[in-house]
Image (cartoon, helix red, strand yellow):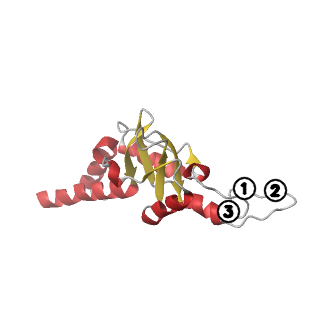
Amino acid sequence: MSEDHRELLDKFYEKKIDEVMEKRLENIPIIERDLTVKDAAVFLTIKNRAWVVESKDNRRLVGVITEKDFLNLFCPRRRTSYFGPPDKMSLHYELFEKAEHIMSRDPIICKADEKVKDALNKMTTHNVRNLPVVENNKIVGEITIHHLIKKFYGIINSLGDEQ
């Protein structure tokens, strides 16, 4: 990597999330906790996650549903005598009606004033590619690895235009 690119990358790491996040709430996959599982599944056919909020009005983040949550629902679990009863988080053992029944609680979040490098460290540490941006317990945006790639590519590309 050239010295110019390293310098750009260092500057990129120091950017605030507010500068690179998706702020248009209509573009962020937000669903209410009482949405049916069937309707939540529709969201996951479009995006690979859905941020679960108490209500669309207050936007208080209460969880996240990912493709992995649905994988756990579909996965056939077997009872083993050594390990005890089967995991109830499978459609084979229990029916789930609402998004809040299948969501993962306490999603990893970031704040608008955090730096890009901090968000990247969270993504790497927790093996996630998307983070909700939360202020006062309300979702105000979203940052994804895709956003970061596009933003960094734009910076490198604009450098080429200047030369």
Residue 74 place in picture, x, y as percent:
64, 66
- Is any atom of residue 15 visible in this view? no
**Taking 151 as reference, is 34 left or right?**
right
Asked where in the image residue 110 lies, by quadrant, the reply is: top left
Q: Residue at x 46, y 46 (%)?
A: 121
Rendered image: mark on residue 85: 2
Secondary structure under tag 1 reads: loop
Q: Residues within 10 Å of mark 2 (few under 14, many from 20)?
A: few
Q: Residue at x 57, y 51 (%)?
A: 103
The reply to whether the C-beta atoms of the residues labelled 2 and 3 are less than 8 Å apart is no
Q: Is residue 116 visible?
A: yes
The residue carrying pointer 3 sits among few (fewer than 14), some (14 to 19) or many (20 or more) residues within 10 Å by Cα, namely some
Helix, strand or loop under label 3 = loop
Horizontal arrangement in the rendering, residue 134 relative to residue 34 (left or right): left
- The N terminus, quarter of image: bottom left
Which comes before the other along the chain, label 2 or label 3? 2
Return the residue nearer the eye: 139 or 158: 139
Quarter of the figure with the C terminus: bottom left
> What's the residue type where badge 3 is placed?
Leu
- Count of numbered badges drawn on the protein: 3
In the rendered image, residue 40, in percent from the top left (x then y), is placed at 51, 58
- What's the distance in space between the residues labelled 3 and 1, CA to CA? 8 Å
Residue at numbered disc 1: 88
Contact (Cβ within 8 Å) of mark 3 with mark 1:
no
Where in the figure is residue 129, as x and y percent of width and height? 45, 55
Q: Amino acid at mark 2?
A: Pro
> Residue flagged by tag 1: what amino acid is it?
Lys
| Disc 1 packing (10 Å; few <14; some 14–19; many ≥20) | few
Q: Are marks 1 and 2 in contact (CB under 8 Å)?
A: yes
Q: Which mark is residue 91?
A: 3
Which residue is at 42% across, 64% downward? Answer: 46
